[in-house]
Amino acid sequence: MDLGLIPFTAKTFAARNDGTDVNYFRPQIEQMDGYTPGEQPQTGKFIKLNTNENPYPPSPAVPAAIMRAAESGLQRYPDPLATAFRLRAGEVLGVDPEWILCGNGSDDILTILTRALVGDGQWLRFPSPSYVLYQTLADLQGAAAEQVAFSADWQLTEAFYQGRDDLRLVLLPNPNSPSGTLIEADAILDLAQRVDCPVLIDEAYVDFSEQSCLPLVQQDPRIMVCRTLSKSYGLAGLRFGFLVAQPVMIDALRKVKDSYNCDALSIAGATAAIDDQAWFADNRQKILTTRSHLAGELRRLGYEVIDSSANFVWCYRHDQSVEQIYRRLKEQRVLIRYMNYPGWGEGLRISVGTDEQIAVCLQLLADVVVD
Amino acid sequence: MDLGLIPFTAKTFAARNDGTDVNYFRPQIEQMDGYTPGEQPQTGKFIKLNTNENPYPPSPAVPAAIMRAAESGLQRYPDPLATAFRLRAGEVLGVDPEWILCGNGSDDILTILTRALVGDGQWLRFPSPSYVLYQTLADLQGAAAEQVAFSADWQLTEAFYQGRDDLRLVLLPNPNSPSGTLIEADAILDLAQRVDCPVLIDEAYVDFSEQSCLPLVQQDPRIMVCRTLSKSYGLAGLRFGFLVAQPVMIDALRKVKDSYNCDALSIAGATAAIDDQAWFADNRQKILTTRSHLAGELRRLGYEVIDSSANFVWCYRHDQSVEQIYRRLKEQRVLIRYMNYPGWGEGLRISVGTDEQIAVCLQLLADVVVD
């Protein structure tokens, strides 16, 4: 079929009939910056310790399940509700499958929630510093974002608990990024009572901690928990996350998600991943051991290191800015995350890699400090 | 890690502090029905001719590429812009890769567009009968949907061309579903000029027609074209679609999409699929041949059949309702789509299956009519 196309060039045309430039977008879209994910170099060889990926490949059961799915009929639409995953995850987590909503990564879950709950001009609250994407989600909804600063020891302050008119959703990453710190379950029950609106506990990193808020979902329908397979199951490339919430919430959220938001391959891979709890336990132990070593060595090098419940550590120095340190490591092809939060300060977030990767990183950090 | 979970039950709790039931959702979410996709039986053996899937498995290059991707590191985040696909698709279609935005199915593209362009209380226009999802997308945005009826011969009426205040997006499936009919390119250029707002040409079925609006994107930045690999590449299970639009549009839309909206497997599979144009041409020819046979036989059985430019045919009878016919076929485990559009009438949409599937379907239809 020859459609007689001529190759497109990058030339664009003024759009409106009156000759003015294109400006069709909603004002909040025009004004916003858009979320910039951590650097993902597509070429060249880097030690990547900047986006909290798992350094190890996933369970071998995952590619095997993906191959079976790829060979058995991609021409059909996938199961809209990813039931195979929900059944297995329900068994593993002790959750009724009707309490689970699956998404194309937990970012998809966050998008579904904000679209369902937060309208134009309404309020969405989250702590600061935390996940930068939350601001983007508020912007997209035309909502007002209320960032409430953590206390100096990364706990919630009184302002975070206060109800307010038109507050429609509270987002709480737990463990938090970049700090890797936890808020206790009791405080979260109290929070939901006092704000009296839905509270999402973003447990992207929870598998590296010793506490989960999953049991709270049963105690209060305002409390919802989202998880991802990107970190603790080594599947950032697969895009699979899920929400646990009471059925009255799940039912309404199903109306908001794209019909076929999870593809047949990711459903198969995610189901195989959560099924392999032996791999999960072994991988988790390796990450925790390396994390402990990394934190200890950083302290030895004079860094202030926050105790981490995640697969990264947050650290900074009292004697110098760490921005230059980030740059020097990048020159040596080791990527870590430099963050500078206005009014809060700066630091380095270093993902827990393999022992070999962390050894290289630590050696460079030692050299830089000596300089 | 034992989190001490007790199994969840389906019991739920009243939520608000005042003891009333949960009602946290935006009013439009509460009120809307949600989009119901075509029946997707997950169990049992059906001949499935109801959701316009390709009856043939995709190019063998697709599972091969997926296996390579699955074995080479799913622990890393995928390329946020699916550049490998954009480069190859750009060559195949004669389009600069910077004019392409990839999505998790073309439903994701439609979601991105409505979120970027249509705000609360603004208008979104589409023809009727067409894709039922468009109404859902308007509902989710809190937008007003203006459904303009097609003329009796499935052409656009004068009302479709008229500009109106706060009209922010026009959606035009071309070829249309359920009719399989086309609007000519000249009419679409005229439409974009007159409505003076973005116009999305949804070309989900275009590969089964003899015309595409892709060249129009160069002529008017209001005109955008979206495509899917679900139908003509046999990849409904993979979730991959893309938009072609001028860079000034693409740049803003990138801010709205989820950062990693396409996973590593679907990017690899989609790139392999569009690369295999020999498979594509052969599959297309098979579908067109079977479609022609199906339409001819339906006419022989006394059906009114609309000439189709898609991988399905739309038909109805003057002498009887076809709802009972749909039910009888379903009892025999052949699924076709029965549609009844208020104020328009009813009909059957039959996807083009394999010759064997269509032979079974036609035999049942012959038996039912004889009854």
Image: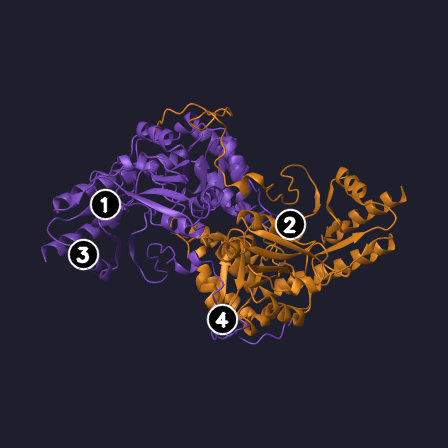
Chain colours: A orange, B purple
* Horizontal side, residue A273 vs residue A258: left or right: right
Q: Residue B299 falls in which quadrant of the image?
A: top left
User: Which dot, 2 or 1, sits closer to the camera?
Assistant: 2
Whether the residues at callouts 3 and 2 have beta carbons within 8 Å, the answer is: no
The kind of secondary structure element at disc 2 is loop
What residue is shown at x 74% (from left), y 51% (from top)? Answer: A350
Give the distance between the C-alpha atoms of the residues marked 1 and 4, in whole angstroms. 42 Å
Give the distance between the C-alpha atoms of the residues marked 2 and 4, in whole angstroms. 32 Å
Q: Which residue is denoted by mark 1 in the rendering? A: B314
Amino acid residing under circle 1: Trp
The kind of secondary structure element at disc 4 is loop
Q: Which quadrant does the C terminus of chain A fall into?
A: top right
Q: Residue A58 falls in which quadrant of the image?
A: bottom right
Q: Which residue is denoted by mark 3 in the rendering? A: B325
Q: Which residue is denoted by mark 4 in the rendering? A: A96
Q: Is residue B53 above or below residue A88?
A: above
Amino acid residing under circle 3: Ile
* Horizontal side, residue B198 vs residue A276: left or right: left
Tag of residue A132:
2
Q: Which quadrant does the N terminus of chain A fall into?
A: top left
